[in-house]
Image (cartoon, coloured by chain):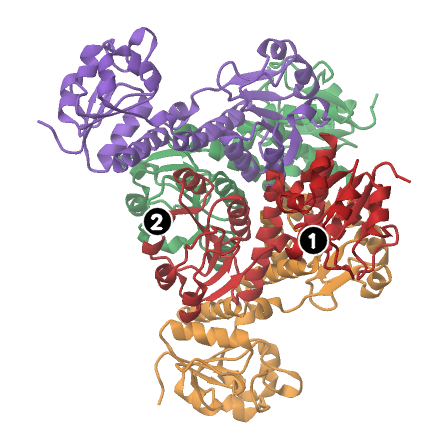
Chain colours: A orange, B red, C green, D purple
Amino acid sequence: MLDVNAFAIIGGDKRQLATAESILDDGYKVYVAGFEKLELKKEIVKTTITDAIKKSNYIILPLPTVLKNNYLNAPYSNLQINLDDNFARNMFDKKVFCGNTEKLIPTSKIWNKIKLYDYSKKEEFAINNAVPTAEGAIEIAMRECEFTINNSQCLVTGFGRIGKILSKMLYGIGAKVTVSARNINDLSWINLLGYNAISIKELPFIKKKFDIIFNTIPALIFDEHILSKIGQKSIIIDLASMPGGVDFESAALLNIKTIRALALPGKVAPKTAGEIIKKIIYRLIKEG
Amino acid sequence: MLDVNAFAIIGGDKRQLATAESILDDGYKVYVAGFEKLELKKEIVKTTITDAIKKSNYIILPLPTVLKNNYLNAPYSNLQINLDDNFARNMFDKKVFCGNTEKLIPTSKIWNKIKLYDYSKKEEFAINNAVPTAEGAIEIAMRECEFTINNSQCLVTGFGRIGKILSKMLYGIGAKVTVSARNINDLSWINLLGYNAISIKELPFIKKKFDIIFNTIPALIFDEHILSKIGQKSIIIDLASMPGGVDFESAALLNIKTIRALALPGKVAPKTAGEIIKKIIYRLIKEG
Amino acid sequence: MLDVNAFAIIGGDKRQLATAESILDDGYKVYVAGFEKLELKKEIVKTTITDAIKKSNYIILPLPTVLKNNYLNAPYSNLQINLDDNFARNMFDKKVFCGNTEKLIPTSKIWNKIKLYDYSKKEEFAINNAVPTAEGAIEIAMRECEFTINNSQCLVTGFGRIGKILSKMLYGIGAKVTVSARNINDLSWINLLGYNAISIKELPFIKKKFDIIFNTIPALIFDEHILSKIGQKSIIIDLASMPGGVDFESAALLNIKTIRALALPGKVAPKTAGEIIKKIIYRLIKEG
Amino acid sequence: MLDVNAFAIIGGDKRQLATAESILDDGYKVYVAGFEKLELKKEIVKTTITDAIKKSNYIILPLPTVLKNNYLNAPYSNLQINLDDNFARNMFDKKVFCGNTEKLIPTSKIWNKIKLYDYSKKEEFAINNAVPTAEGAIEIAMRECEFTINNSQCLVTGFGRIGKILSKMLYGIGAKVTVSARNINDLSWINLLGYNAISIKELPFIKKKFDIIFNTIPALIFDEHILSKIGQKSIIIDLASMPGGVDFESAALLNIKTIRALALPGKVAPKTAGEIIKKIIYRLIKEG
C-alpha cells in the first residue's frame, strides 16, 4: 500500500542517508534500500528496492546515480543493482529524483515515460554545495599547514561559486586574500569586496609569495613555469574537477606539496550535503 | 668562542624548533641541543648543551621549561636533562628566555644572578596564541561535525582573548554566533560586534539549540542541568585550561560529544607558535 | 598640432572633471571645453571644443552625452552646444568615448564613420558604480535616521550589483540584514553569505519590522498593501531607476518617510566616479 | 500622588527626549519638565519640575547635568533652572540618575542625602556610545570626501573603544584600514583582526599616504612634523575630546582639511543615545 508523502531512498552514500534522516525528521515516512551494510535509526524502514518504491510516491536516487556497467551507485549495499528495464518499471506513476539523468535515461526506454528530475543540475545545488566544498578546503589547509590561516598569504584562483565563498571565509578568518580571475568583471568584484585582484595573465609576473593556493579552475593554470615562480614554499589545494589545474609532476619535482580535493561535500559535511538535496527535492515537488 | 647575536635553543618541541628555524631565517646563528631524535636543517647546528650555551648570548628554554622532578622539557632529546646548579651555571652573562620562571628559579640559587625573561607571561604571548587556538578549535569542529559551520548555531562561552578571536572567525565563516559572558561590558561588546549576547546566568533558560559549543571559561559552566537543556545534539569543544568547563561524566550520560582541546598552538600551528615566541624575544632584547 | 596621448574632455559635470584630473595625474595632456563656469587646476588646458579635439587623439563625452533637443550635456558651459554634423565632423580619426551612443548616433550621419565607444554600457561600469551608490545610500540613511545602522533591522530588496555590495556594507557596519529577492539562486546566496533571506513573494507575510528599507528593484514592490504591513516606522530609500519601486502616494498617506536617490555616484563620490570612467577608457584604448 | 514606576525627565536635549520616549514605549508613565520649546507626543506629560518629580520615583537629569553658573542643562526650556537647595530638596526619597555627579553634588548639601547614580561614568555607557560616535565619524567622512570609503586608505589612531568599532566598520565598508597605537598588546590585536598595525612612534616614518585620518587619541599626535609627512591630501576627522589630537593651525597652513567632531551620539543618533541611557538606568534600578 502506498503511504502518501512517503519517500524511498534507493542506494547512495552517507549523504543520501543524511537526506533520508532529514526527511524523516520532517515527519515523513522514509523507506530505504541498498544500505544493508549500515545500521540505521530504527524509524527508517529498511526493505527491498521493490517494496520501498511501491510504498512511496517520491523516489530518490543517488549522485551519481549510474556507475560504470550501468550499476546503481550503492556502496553500502551487499548487492550489485542493475539499472535495467526491471528497475525502471518500478517507477511508473512515481516522481523520481536522480543525480545524472543523461546516464540513467539510456539504461531503459521506460524512463521516457516517467517523471524524472535531476537535482544535481540545478544551479541551487551547485551554489549550496560550494559551502561544504569551501569549508572542506579550509579544513585541509588547517590540517596540512604548520602555520595559521590568519595572516597567511592565500591565493584563490577562479571566482565562480567556490571561489566566491572560499575567499569570503578565508578573509573572515583573517587571511590576506588574493583572488585571480580572467574576466574583467570578476576582477572588479574581487577588488570591491576587499581582496587583492590579479588577472590570470599576470600571475606569472607577480612577486608576492603565497603560503596557500586554492585552485578552482578546471584548466591548467599552474604549469611548470608558474609553479617555479609563485609556488615555492606554497601548498596547493586543487578543488577543480578533473583533470584539475595543476601540473602535478612539475609540482613534485619542485617539491611543492599538492592536494587534490574532490567531492568534498559528501565527505566533510554529509549532513549538510544531504539537506541540500532534500531542500531541492521539496522545492521540485512544490513546483509540481 | 662566542658568536655575537647567536641563539641557543635548548630543549622543547616542534614549536621551539620553529622558533629556531625562524631565527635562522632572519640571518642569525642558531645552536640547538636536546633535539637528537629529529633531523634538522643543516644550517642549524646541533651540539651539546654546554657548547650551545657557550657560543650564544641568547638562550631560549622551552614552554613549559620545567617538567616534574625538575627535568627540562625536551621530548626530542635522548637524555633526561636535570635542571640543577650545573645547568644554571652555564648561563652566567647570558640573557635567558624561558617558559615558566616560577618553576625554574627554585631549581638553583644561581638563577638569581642571571638575566631571566619569561616570554610566556607577556600579555602579547597570550593574545597572539589565541589565534592558533581559535583555528585549532575550528579545525576540530570541522573534522568532527557532519554539517558545515556556515549557517550552524554556534555558542562561544567567554569573551576573553580566545572568545573574541574565535567568535570573529566563526562569524567570518558564516556561522550564527551567540556569545555568552558574565560581565555587562563584555555583553555590550558582543552585541555591538554583531553576535547574539547572552548572560551566563541566562544560559539555562534559553530555548535556542546549539550545534557546536566552544567553551573558553575555566569554571564549571556546563553542569548537568545546563547540559540537559542546551547541549542535546550539540558537540562541545572545551578550550579552557584544567579542569575545563564541562561536567564530562554528565555529558557522557547525556550522549553529548565532548572534546577537550588543550595546548593547541604547538599542535596545530607550530610554525606560527614558534614565530610568536621569536617576536617576543626580539622585542625583549630590543628593550634591553 | 596633435599631442600624442592627449585627451579632450568635452562637457559634463564634476564626475567628468574628476576624470580629467585623474588622467592629468597619470601624466597625460588634458584639454577641456565646456567648463567655463568652473575654475580648474592650471595644468588642465581650457580651450574651445574645436581646439581641444584637434589637439587630442582621445575624446571623452559626458554621461549622458545627449540632452533633450540634441544638446550636449554641459552644465558648466556658458553655451548650449549643438550635437550636429559640425560637432561630429571634428571627430574624424579620433577615438571617441561617450555615455549613450544610441542617442548620439542619430544626431549626425558622420558618427557612423567614427570609432565610438560607450563606456556606460560596460558591465564593469555598473559593477564599480554600485559602490558609490551603496555608500551614498548609507550616507542618506545615516543622515536621516535618529538611530544607528549598527543593530538596526535593514531590508534590502534586490540582489543585483547594488543589492550585493549594499548588503555587505550594512552587515559590515553591524546591521541586522535581511535581503529579499525573487530568484531561488539569489536566495541561496543571500543565505550563505549570512543574511536573512526572504522571497519577494513572502514579503507581505513577514512579521519582522524594519527600521530602514533600501529598494533596488525597478518595479512596484512597495505597494499600499506591503507598505501597510512592513513599512510602518520604516524609512524607505529607493535606489531603483525610474519609476522606482515604491507607491509614494500611499507611503505619504501612511506617514512613511521615503527618499528617492538617483545618480548617486556623481553626487556623493565624483572623484571615484570619474576614476571608474577613466579606467574603462584606458582599458578600451589598450584593447584597441 | 506618586505613580509607581514613573519617570521624570528634567531638562536635556533630544537624546534625553529619546530616553523619555523609549521609556514610554516600555509602558511606563513619563513626566517631563524643561522641554517647553518642543512639541512632544501627547502621551508624555509636560508639567512643572516640582510636579514631575513629585509624581515619579525615578528622576533622570541630563548629560552634562550642570552648565556653567550652576544652571541645569536644559536647552529646550524657556527658563533658566538653578541647581540649588530648592532643586535638590525635591529629590528626597527618589532615585536620581544624572550625568556628572562631581559637578552636581557641590550645588547643594542635600545631595549627600539622596540616592544619586551617574550613568555617564559606567564603562557600559562609553562602550555603547562608541557606536554612534563611529557612525557619526563615517557619515562625516562620506559627506566630506569626493571619493568612496571603499578602497580608500584610512588611518585610525588609537585602539580604545571608538578605535575598535570604527576600524571594524571601515573594514566592513571595504576600506584599507591601518590602525596606529602605542601599546604592543593593542598592536597585536590590530594585526590579528586584519588591519595594518603601526606603532605611534613609527607614524612619522611611514611612506603610505592616507585619504582619511580618524584621530581618537586626546593628545597631540598630529603635530606639524607628522602633518607634513602623512597628512598631505588627507582629510583629518578628530574625534578626541578637548584639546584634540591635531595642530589645527599647522594643518591650515598645510592646506589639510580638518574637522573636529565632538558629542556625536546625541547629534547623529539621539534615539540610540537615549536608549543607551535608558538601558543603563534600568539596570541600575534592577541592581538596586
Q: Which residue is mark 2?
A: B201
Chain under disc 2 = B
As drawn, A285 above or below D111: below
User: CB under 8 Å between callouts 1 and 2?
Assistant: no
> Label 2 sits on what residue type?
Lys
Dot 1 lies on which element?
helix
Q: Position of residue D118 (x, y in %)?
A: 33, 25
Q: Work out whether B182 lies above or below A223.
A: above
Of the 4 image quadrants, the one containing the N terminus of chain A is bottom left
Q: Which mark is residue A39?
A: none
Badge 1 is on which residue? B270
Q: Is residue A105 left or right of residue C97?
A: left
Q: Quadrant of residue A4?
A: bottom left
* Crowd around label 2: few <14 · some 14–19 · many ≥20 (10 Å): few
Location of the C terminus of chain A by quadrant is bottom left
Chain hosting mark 1: B
